[in-house]
Amino acid sequence: MSTPQPNAIRHYLQFTDLSADEYAHLFARAAEIKRKFKAYEKYHPLADRTLAMIFEKASTRTRVSFEAGMYQLGGSVVHLTTGDSQLGRSEPIEDSARVISRMTDLVMIRTYGQDKIDRFAAHSRVPVINGLTNEFHPCQILADIFTFIEHRGSIQGKVVAWVGDGNNMANTWLQAAELLGFTVHLSTPSGYEVNESVAALKGTGNFKVFNDPLEACRGADLVTTDVWTSMGYEAENEARKKAFANWCVDEAMMQVAKPDALFMHCLPAHRGEEVSAEVIDGPQSVVWDEAENRMHVQKALMEFLLLGRVNA
Ligand code: CP
Ligand code: NVA
């Protein structure tokens, strides 16, 4: 990735859209922006800037973190959904991109196929951020790694155990592992494996596959999971409940991980399905810090995409 030029449009559509050096900058900025927030220090670098948020799927954390975050940076927000805009009445995504990006400074989209956000970005005059697609959830992994760093220091060389679906979160963890130099232990039920071509991995050997989820957790620094059925896959719910029955992160799995291992979950969670209540509500769980950190890292991301490297 080349050094960004002033005013060059940078999108954040996949984890690989930023370099390791840029992530180091973002994590430092997120820490400083979080400090300012906790101290009620006014910080309005995005005054007069507008963020458009487009949701084609439900959200709690992504909506609140982007909306509150943008206001806290001095900007404002426009919120659109498929149901209340022409997006739900078949206006071409390219036309929507042309129009929305003439009136706003930044766009966040949560949608289905990655091709849709790619097409939007290709016709946008302003930076576009992926707020979750079927394939990727880069803002979440940004928050997860920032949370790991806050609690344990650098993630480089560490082991992250992924227990569950080979979904958007799993794909993004794999991209992050290659870029930032850690290893993912992947355990998914048969038929729900990661499709390696989606993540377009370079083959640097940053993940290992385990049939047994307990073995994936052995020696891990971080154990993480996600819902059995992601948004858009609800028709498969009953089949997934059967296939995923043994992929519940429980105390036995946490016990074979490192003694100081953390537990994360992007939320929303289903206690008794992908994670036991004892684990998610237990002492190794950092899920509330993880959720809060969505806002701090995304404020750093919006600052970077609109203003470049700031050191205020
Ligand atoms: N983790 C996450 O993206 O949550 P929401 O679906 O509530 O935005
Ligand atoms: N994999 C989940 C993440 C939700 C934040 C989904 O796509 O529904």
Image: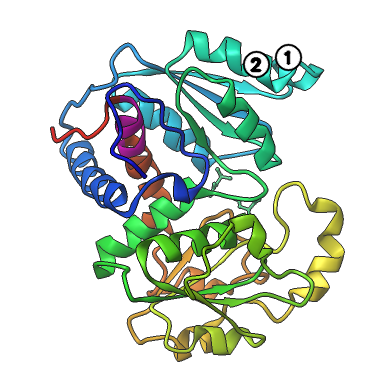
In terms of depth relative to the viewer, which is nearer, 281 or 159?
159
- The quarter of the image holding the C terminus is top left
Numbered mark located on residue 96 in the image: 2
Location of residue 6 in the rendering, given as x and y in whole percent from the top left corner: 27, 24
Which residue, given by chain and number where applicable, does mark 1 sit on?
86
In terms of depth relative to the viewer, which is nearer, 312 or 250?
312
Q: Quadrant of residue 73?
A: top left
Amino acid at the residue labelled 1: Gln
**Above or below for 15 versus 226:** above
**Above or below for 172 versus 38:** below
**Above or below for 189 versus 175:** below
Region rendered in magenta:
300-306
- The quarter of the image holding the N terminus is top left
Alpha carbon separation for disc pair 2 and 1: 8 Å
Image label count: 2
Numbered mark located on residue 227 in the image: none
Amino acid at the residue labelled 2: Ser
Residue at 61% across / 21% down in the picture? 80
Secondary structure at numbered mark 1: helix
The answer to whether residue 57 of the structure is visible from this angle is no
Assess whether residue 272 is covered by the magenta stretch.
no
In terms of depth relative to the viewer, which is nearer, 310 or 300?
310
Q: Is residue 119 left or right of residue 73?
A: right
